[in-house]
Image: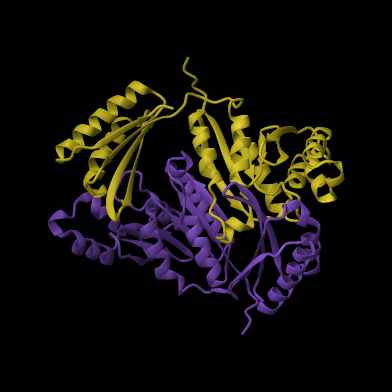
Chain colours: A purple, B yellow
Amino acid sequence: MSNTREYTAAVIVIGNEILSGRTQDTNTNYIASSLSDRGIRLMEARVIPDVKDTIIETVNTLRAQYDYVFTTGGIGPTHDDITAECIARAFDVELKVNDDAFRILEEYYGIEELTQARVKMAYIPVGAKLIANPVSAAPGFQMENVYVFAGVPRIMQAMMNNVVDDLRGGDPMLNASVACSLPESVMAEDVGKLQGDYDGKIEIGSYPHFRAGVLGLSIVLRSTDKETLEKATAELIVLIEGRGEVPLVSYSYN
Amino acid sequence: MSNTREYTAAVIVIGNEILSGRTQDTNTNYIASSLSDRGIRLMEARVIPDVKDTIIETVNTLRAQYDYVFTTGGIGPTHDDITAECIARAFDVELKVNDDAFRILEEYYGIEELTQARVKMAYIPVGAKLIANPVSAAPGFQMENVYVFAGVPRIMQAMMNNVVDDLRGGDPMLNASVACSLPESVMAEDVGKLQGDYDGKIEIGSYPHFRAGVLGLSIVLRSTDKETLEKATAELIVLIEGRGEVPLVSYSYN
């Protein structure tokens, strides 16, 4: 049942608040993890400002290049929420009140409270499919291979969860994480040689980190093939033990 | 003393571990905040994989477009640390052992412990200026308008702190943050009108958020001019009070 085709994706984070440093983006990480689990490879992420031409150009560049594009941010009721309009222009379709979106908002707010600002959130590019928002009603949408999500993490996560099972992916990426307290430079040659031995079959990354003020090292092996992954990981364990350490190993198969 | 020229920057986060979802990037946020304080506008951030051609192309695209480019990640001792080589190729200069970098590493590790993997971290593009690493010795470097930092946040932050005062910036961006518990859609028309009144002078962003499970709203006004910022903020406060709420206001002038 091996699926050799690789599926790719890009994330576009739309929002001045990320670029000003006011807000720490966490949406990219959530989407990245969900995609890894699904066997889809996130190839790049871009954070861009609330500028129409930039949004349109970035969407059109990336949707031509990857299987999936996910945008976050800019679909609320205010003047700086311009994503839906930009997606319509990127696809050269009209932006119109979507009947289903209107009904969802009407039900949530009540018809008397359905102000002009709220109706704005019912304007969806013609041809798009709505993505439910279980938190605050106003939907996201899918236009061909572009998925348009809210920016508020709780809403964004719910929207991602609503679509992820329907995405076509390849074999999911399996991980082994091997942690030790050796300096990265001590392991570098061994790990480089191991990568050479398994080139094209396993990707090995080496990540130093501080925990409680102590420099440690995680070596991460990634592969779609469980047997190869476990074989390479066993070899790495022997190499670390050869340097006098017993590593902590964890596999993540989702 | 107003400086009308706008200074711009881009961040390039280099690392498969961010794209796989394993690691949450926090470096972009740190750089973004430092640049805001310095009066430099972060225009975009890209997360890209450990792929040579992608790194070279992204660096060359962005360094031509912005005043400053900051890269994070990929300058360690292992096989997946390819940033220095890519920067050399992007600038079409040689990658050679830098005498100063070599001495720094020699002093830190001692000559007997200066393995081949560690010497790799002394290979710096010819013409680059070193950026000190007070945490683990191996330096970053500056090549024209491109600043090459480590990926480990503690090291990256130290490197940014080492260079930020020497960056030429414009007038620093001042912020007012006005928080209330009104729904975003209730404030949308008022805020849109206020943005219209101050177009080109103030940027207003509207950010709903969850705190302790409650949906709240922050409206952020940004300007380089203190007087205009305070005037617009006062008007916004009146608008919110008109809706029966007393907002929380904080200014950030750094």
Q: What percent of the width, then of the height, locates residue B48?
A: 62, 53
A243 or A10: nearer the eye?
A: A243
Q: What percent of the width, then of the height, locates residue A76?
A: 32, 52
The residue sitting at 47% across, 26% down in the picture is: B172
Q: Is residue B199 left or right of residue A16?
A: left
The quarter of the displayed image where residue A98 is located:
bottom left
Looking at the picture, does residue A5 appear above or below residue B151?
below
Looking at the picture, does residue B226 appear above or below residue A123?
above
The residue sitting at 53% across, 54% down in the picture is: B24
The residue sitting at 57% across, 40% down in the picture is: B10
The residue sitting at the top extreme is B1
Q: Answer yes or no: is residue A43 visible.
A: no
The residue sitting at the front extreme is A244
Looking at the picture, does residue B116 appear above or below residue A101?
above
Q: What percent of the width, then of the height, locates residue B160?
A: 60, 35
The quarter of the displayed image where residue B108 is located:
top right
